[in-house]
Image (cartoon, grey):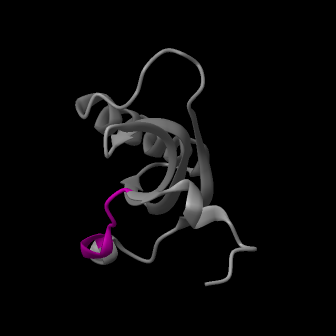
Amino acid sequence: MPAFKATVVGENFQFVVDDEAQLLDFTRTLYVDAEDEATAHQAALARVREELIAQALLDDDGGQLLTIDELCQAESQADEALIGEFIWYFPEDDDPGEDD
């Protein structure tokens, strides 16, 4: 069965940081085994949803968004050791006009 590398993007996930609620975005790269690209797409989103539910970060309010940013067939799952964790982005990380 082919392996696929997927980059999942999440938007509007609420975190409490320094006693203040903030909406954060993330990316998560993972590998899934699937017969085809459509099945890989569904499997990647399902796995990320499961991880978020396990961490009590996914709710039913409808404000959160999960999408696939990139999906491609992987050479092998030997690269699976390179799987990343969730990479969270704070609002100030998204301000390209800010020069320090």
Q: Quadrant of residue 71?
A: bottom right
Q: Position of residue 19 (x, y in %)?
A: 32, 38
Instruction: Classify the position of the N terminus by image quarter.
Output: bottom left
Quarter where residue 14 is shown:
top left
Asked if residue 14 lies in the magenta stretch, the reply is no
> Where is residue 12 drawn, in percent x and y?
56, 37
Quadrant into which the C terminus falls: bottom right
Q: Is residue 82 magenta?
A: yes
Q: Number of marks in the image?
A: 0
Give, as a single range, the part of the protein colored magenta.
80-86
| Picture residue at 44% right of the left edge, 49% below the top | 34
Seen in the picture, residue 26 relative to 100 is either above or below; the reply is: above
Left or right of 41, for residue 79: left
Residue 48 visible to the viewer: yes
Q: Is residue 21 above or below residue 87?
A: above
Q: Is residue 1 visible?
A: no
**Position of 78 relative to 26 (above/below):** below
The picture places residue 13, in percent across and down from the top left corner, at 48, 37
- Front one among 59 and 16: 16
Residue depicted at x 38% and y 60%: 31
Q: Residue furthest bottom?
A: 100
The residue most toward the right is: 97
